[in-house]
Image (cartoon, grey):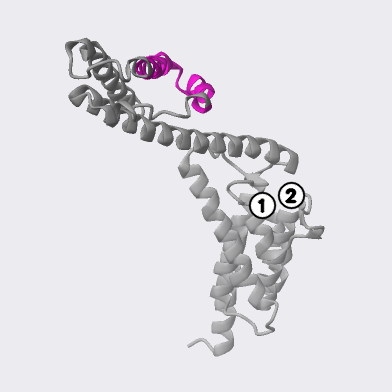
Amino acid sequence: MPSDNELREQQESEHNDIFDRLIVHPEIRRVSEHGFKSRNYRNAIFDSYVQLEEMVKKKTNYPKSRGRELIGVALMHNIFDVNNPLLLWSSLKTQAERDELEGFKHIFAGAIQGIKNPLSHSVDNQDPWRALNQIILANYLAFIVDMAKYRSPTQKTEKFTEKASARANEEELAKIRDQIVTDLKKARKNLEGLFRSGGVDYLHRISALTTWNHYKSNLEKFYQEIFSDFLDVYGNIEKLNEIIKISLGTVNYSSPRFNPHKKLAYETVKKIDYLLEKLK
């Protein structure tokens, strides 16, 4: 039956064999091999993550924030920020690619916060199997750093400022669209009342679209395919307003003479329905 020393030597040999087969990144192996094989597992783990952090800093030209060099968790959050990354390995055009980068940001930051940082406050040695698993993770993340491409702050500012601007334009367009829809619905309600009853109260309220000049350039830019229909709607409303101004006090609104104006209001409502459908 093997003695305790023989069993311990056999286990150490197995651990070292696994280390040799799995820890293959040259930088991680260089800093951790001696500590691991001399059973100083705490140092082997700690040195692996110190080296991983140094690799990240070096590849990103030692980034700073407010004049101070970024380190640790803050460093990882900065360089893998999905909206402004310094390191990336995809175009980030799809949500899946953005989610992947976001996930690795948390893995890198978590490795520093959950593995490296506690060891900086402890001198206790670690279990060899735990050490192997944690060094394997550092080994894998080191290859991720090698694979990633560096985007300089100038490049990332230009690229992502353009994206931010596009998003801002989309948000502004959405606000404009929502206001247009609101005004069109209000105009529709008033116009429908006009051609259904012809009452004076409705005639005073059909000018619901009071911000036409404000919208005009945006409509022409963003809704070119239906811009002429907007012109027709506003043109009809303006025509009705002119008719009302001329006719007030001189026309019997229930007489057949007013029917063409009711027809114009009806046609305008139909045009508004078409626009609202296109704006969905």
Vertical order, 217 against 23 (above or below): above
On screen, residue 263 versus residue 272, left or right, reads left
Label 2: which secondary element = loop
How far across and down, in percent of the image, does residue 94 sit?
A: 48, 38
Vertical order, 66 against 38 (above or below): above
Disc 1 to disc 2: CB gap under 8 Å: yes
Residue 4 visible in the picture: yes
Residues at marks 1 and 2, CA–CA distance in whole angstroms: 8 Å
Q: In the depicted view, which residue is nearer to us: 236 or 180?
A: 236
Identify the residue position indicated by label 1 in the image.
Answer: 79
Is residue 181 within the magenta segment? Answer: no
Identify the residue position indicated by label 2 in the image.
Answer: 60
N-terminal of the two: label 1 or label 2? 2
Vertical order, 250 against 129 (above or below): above
Q: Amino acid at mark 2?
A: Thr
> Residue at coordinates 38% horizontally, 32% vertically from top-left?
183
Specify few, some or many for label 1: CA neighbours under 10 Å numbering under 14, 14-19, or 20 or more.
Answer: many
> Residue at coordinates 64% horizontally, 82% vertically from top-left?
125
The magenta stretch is 214-242
How far across and down, in percent of the image, does residue 110 sit?
A: 57, 65
Q: Amino acid at mark 1?
A: Ile
Label 1: which secondary element = helix
Q: Quadrant of residue 267?
A: top left
Q: In the depicted view, which residue is nearer to us: 234 or 154?
A: 234
> Residue at coordinates 46% horizontally, 44% vertically from top-left?
96
Is residue 222 within the magenta segment? Answer: yes
